[in-house]
Image: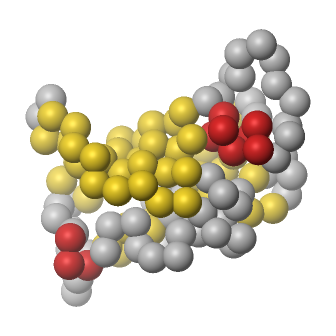
Amino acid sequence: MAGYLTTHVLDTARGCPAQGMKIDLYRIDGEERSHIRTVVTNSDGRTDAHVLPVPEFRTGTYELVFHAGAYLDEVAVPSEDVRFLDVIPLRFGMSEQMHYHVPLLLSPYSYSTYRGS
């Protein structure tokens, strides 16, 4: 089986997919953090292509950086002087050649994630 990475962002406060959220993917090698790509969520809160497609997949440690503050600003969620959640980094490991799905459930004051299917 070939490995690849996907994500999905849901705006739980508004009850809808988080369309238009910028997400950066990094590979972590020791202290080195290498940017792989930037993607943006579509109308379903997913990306149009795999975040890390089969030909580029390698096991190891990765980080998805969700630009939640910019998304919340774009959808006109009121903020304080400084937004409680701005940039959300999720660091995780992929140890097998398989499909990894790392979703984000977001509200202005909390988030959660899990290993999806």
Picture quadrant where residue 31 is located: top left
What is the residue that sits farthest to the left in this orientation? 30
Look at the image and tell me whether residue 92 can be seen: no
Residue 101 placement (x, y as % from top left):
45, 66
Residue drawn at point x = 28 percent, y = 47 percent = 35
Q: Residue at x 76, y 37 (%)?
A: 73
Q: Quadrant of residue 78?
A: top right
Outermost residue on the bottom side: it is 1
Q: Is residue 79 left or right of residue 116?
A: right
Q: Quarter-wise, where is residue 71 in the image?
A: top right
Can the viewer see residue 16 in this picture?
yes
Q: In terms of depth relative to the viewer, which is nearer, 57 or 113? A: 57
How many numbered marks are there?
A: 0
Where in the figure is residue 75, as x and y percent of width and height? 82, 47
How far from the left and from the top, in percent, is residue 69? 66, 34
Expressed as whole percent of the image width and height from the top left, the position of residue 87 reads: 54, 33
On screen, 30 above or below 12?
above
* Left or right of 52 in this view: 103: right
Q: How is the image coloured?
A: secondary structure
Horizontal side of 80 relative to 93 (left or right) equals right
Q: Residue furthest top?
A: 81
Q: Quadrant of the N terminus?
A: bottom left
Q: Is residue 2 above or below residue 32?
A: below
Q: Residue at x 53, y 69 (%)?
A: 47
Examine the rendered structure and indicate whether residue 84 appears above or below residue 43. above
